[in-house]
Image (cartoon, helix red, strand yellow):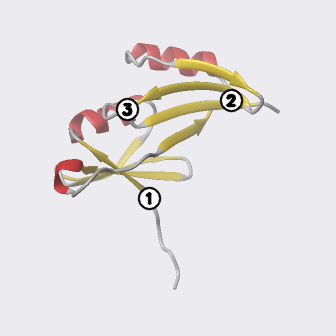
Amino acid sequence: MMIKDSNVTINVTDMDKSISFYKSIGLTEKARWGNHYAQLTAPGLVIGLHPSQNLPGGSGNVSIGFTADNFEEVKSSLQKVSIQVTERQEEGGHFLHFTDPDGTAVYFIKPKP
């Protein structure tokens, strides 16, 4: 068996709002099938969005991380689209934490060298 492609699917309540959010933080829309499913990409990652009302149960916990070198540029970009962030520094690096429209944890990290 050979895996051809992969993605992580996030269950969302509003496809348009979620697609707009992920595009606003730098992802690119790869494909969309109306309000049934959409895929957005970042280097090395494909995120699928699926309407949660079509699935039984919850979606569980997931967090999505992106690496960035210029945190001032990232912070400025997030502020421009009114995304509230929490900054944190720890042994591993500098973090900007925030959530998507459905509460999924998203972060940017500038790892320590």
Residue to which mark 3 is pinned: 100
Residue for point 43% across, 16% down: 84
Which of 90/82 is in front? 90
Report which residue position mark 2 lands on: 110
**From mark 3 to mark 1, how far is it between C-alphas?**
17 Å
Quarter holding the C terminus is: top right
Mark with earlier residue (3, 2):
3
Which of pointers 3 and 1 indicates the residue nearer the eye? 3
Picture layout, residue 104 above or below residue 49: above
What amino acid is found at the position of numbered circle 2 in the picture? Answer: Lys
Q: Quadrant of residue 100?
A: top left
**98 vs 5: above or below:** above
Q: CA distance from mark 2 to mark 1?
A: 23 Å
Closer-to-camera residue (76/18): 18
Amino acid, disc 1? Asn
Q: Residue furthest bottom?
A: 1
Q: Among all residues in the image, which is located at the extreme front? A: 57
Which amino acid, by three-letter code, is at mark 3?
Asp
Q: Which residue is mark 1?
A: 7
Residue 109 in the image: state x and y as whole percent: 63, 31
Label 2 element class: strand
- Of tags 3 and 2, the one toward the viewer is 3
Helix, strand or loop at disc 3? Answer: loop
Within 10 Å of the Cα at label 2, are there few (<14), some (14-19), or many (20+) other Cα atoms? some
Provide the secondary structure element on which disc 1 rests.
loop
What's the residue at 30%, 50% (across, down)? 58
Q: CA distance from mark 3 to mark 2?
A: 20 Å
Looking at the picture, how far across and down is residue 68, in whole percent?
Answer: 63, 31
